[in-house]
């Protein structure tokens, strides 16, 4: 594996606008995309479980300066903080300090969730999985001299700009992403151990993973201002003071670099395989398992388990910054990227799509063309006909004329003119179903099922289609 050569090539040909995940003819090099989206700086790192790492910085630490982004430049890690905090919490579970399925009231002493006497129990697991049903909150940060305490955030007091943390949904009933879950987790971990959160996470995660350029301490960027990327609003406007302070440390308060974020995800990948000295296999597996059936979030971990895109990690957006850190377990490779701009997400999606194509190694087996020919139904009024003509599959949707599908080596097909990806999927002994992916949305068309004719009746009955999307 030649990481430097791989990524010099990949960053020279990124999708300008990602939709299906397939490389389109509309590509651009990284510097061009940075200019298009007014992103001053980007830092990228790629690592393998073998220990090989490649990292590079691009652009400047702040608009109007010439100070370059380097591989040791720190950025706000935004909601990747939750991923690291969850790792620390699971290490406390492993040590017997916390129980995943215990009521949070067993640990909280400094603050209590209001209305608990009328509520079902809220557990540590539900906080980690965003299923506790707490207030819907996104944290925007504060000027350093106006930041409230965490208790004020929980209570809605002082200078806080967010509502008090309250139960608003039935605990465990569904997933709803909210920073308030991790603010409660932060206070719970502090109360359970008696240690300041930034010290606790340094001991549980940062020091064991050699993350020396990372910290939850909000004084960290002030202590090394020449090595911190300044945040920017859309259009390249600098954040007054350079960055904002986040008292909600577990939810959004980590400072880090891509090179160091890789270490966490690669350690989790090792743990899932039973090869970590820090986290046992069972807890790591739970971390990477959807906590709601069919969901895409584990314990502090974003999950994508599609065969051609299997990865886990976390994304993040704070005022002034965007980032992601993911591992592709099938290839043992992780990629992290951070920008100092709120407009950085489109750029990051292009980088992540390139990594998907390179590292999601599980491939789809091509269906024998003769086995998939026939009529499929997306809706009662939308038939799709697949035919085998001169050895090629043709596709005709509703009233459209047939077109020849273009075969990919991985078993998928493309429409020659549209942003449409087609694949045929079969599980066990069931017939093939037709999956259509357009702009990241997947729809399923099922075979038309012919029913035996009855006296006075003719025609067919069609299964109701399953539609999925992200």
Image: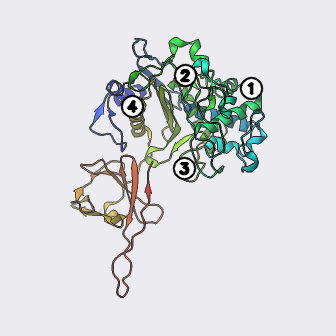
Task: Tell me whether the residue at label 1 lies in contact with that at label 4, contact meaning CB atoms closer than 8 angstroms.
Answer: no
Mark before the other along the chain sequence, 3 or 4? 3
Residue underneath mark 3: 295
The answer for how far apart the CA atoms under marks 3 and 2 are is: 32 Å
The answer for how far apart the CA atoms under marks 4 and 2 are is: 23 Å
The answer for how far apart the CA atoms under marks 1 and 4 are is: 38 Å
Q: Residue 244 carries which label?
A: 2
The answer for how far apart the CA atoms under marks 3 and 4 are is: 26 Å
Residue underneath mark 1: 195
Mark before the other along the chain sequence, 3 or 2? 2
Is residue 165 shown above or below 207?
Answer: below
Q: Nearer the viewer, residue 291 or 428?
A: 291
Q: Neighbour class for label 4 at 10 Å: few (<14), some, many (≥20)?
A: many
The answer for how far apart the CA atoms under marks 3 and 1 are is: 33 Å
Mark before the other along the chain sequence, 1 or 4? 1
Q: Nearer the viewer, residue 125 or 167?
A: 167
């Amino acid at each position: 594996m030649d990481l430097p050569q791989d990524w010099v090539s990949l960053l020279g040909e990124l999708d300008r606008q990602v939709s299906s995940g397939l490389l389109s003819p509309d590509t651009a090099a990284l510097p061009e995309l940075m200019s298009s989206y007014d992103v001053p700086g980007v830092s990228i790192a790629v690592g393998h479980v073998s220990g090989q790492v490649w990292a590079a910085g691009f652009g400047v630490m702040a608009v109007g300066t010439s100070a370059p982004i380097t591989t040791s430049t720190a950025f706000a890690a935004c909601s990747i903080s939750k991923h690291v905090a969850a790792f620390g919490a699971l290490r406390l579970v492993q040590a017997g300090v916390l129980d995943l399925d215990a009521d949070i009231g067993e640990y909280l002493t400094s603050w209590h969730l209001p209305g608990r006497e009328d509520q079902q129990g809220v557990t540590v697991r539900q906080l980690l999985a965003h299923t506790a049903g707490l207030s819907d909150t996104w944290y925007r940060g504060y000027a350093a001299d106006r930041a409230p305490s965490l208790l004020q955030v929980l209570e809605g007091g002082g200078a806080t700009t967010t509502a008090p943390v309250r139960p608003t949904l039935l605990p465990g009933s569904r997933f709803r992403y909210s920073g308030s879950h991790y603010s409660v987790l932060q206070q719970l971990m502090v109360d359970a151990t008696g240690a300041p959160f930034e010290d606790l996470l340094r001991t549980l995660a940062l020091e064991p993973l050699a993350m020396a350029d990372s910290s939850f301490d909000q004084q960290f960027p002030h202590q090394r201002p020449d090595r911190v990327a300044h945040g920017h609003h859309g259009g390249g406007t600098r954040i007054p003071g350079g960055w904002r302070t986040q008292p909600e440390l577990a939810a959004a308060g980590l400072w880090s670099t891509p090179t160091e974020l890789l270490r966490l995800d690669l350690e989790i990948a090792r743990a899932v395989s039973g090869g970590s000295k820090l986290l046992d296999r069972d807890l790591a597996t739970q971390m990477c398992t959807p906590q709601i059936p069919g969901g895409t979030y584990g314990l502090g971990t974003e999950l994508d388990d599609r065969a051609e895109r299997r990865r886990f990690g976390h994304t993040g957006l704070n005022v002034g910054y965007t980032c992601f850190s993911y591992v592709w377990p099938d290839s043992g490779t992780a990629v992290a990227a951070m920008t100092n701009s709120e407009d950085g997400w489109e750029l990051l999606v292009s980088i992540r799509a390139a990594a998907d194509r390179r590292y999601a190694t599980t491939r789809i087996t091509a269906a024998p063309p003769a086995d998939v020919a026939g009529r499929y139904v997306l809706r009662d009024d939308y038939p799709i006909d697949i035919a085998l003509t001169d050895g090629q599959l043709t596709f005709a949707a509703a009233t459209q004329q047939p077109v020849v599908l273009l075969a990919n080596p991985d078993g998928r097909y493309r429409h020659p003119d549209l942003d449409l990806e087609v694949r045929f999927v079969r599980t066990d002994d069931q017939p093939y179903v037709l999956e259509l992916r357009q702009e990241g949305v997947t729809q399923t068309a099922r075979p038309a099922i012919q029913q035996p004719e009855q006296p006075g009746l003719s025609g067919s009955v069609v299964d109701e289609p399953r539609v999925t999307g992200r």
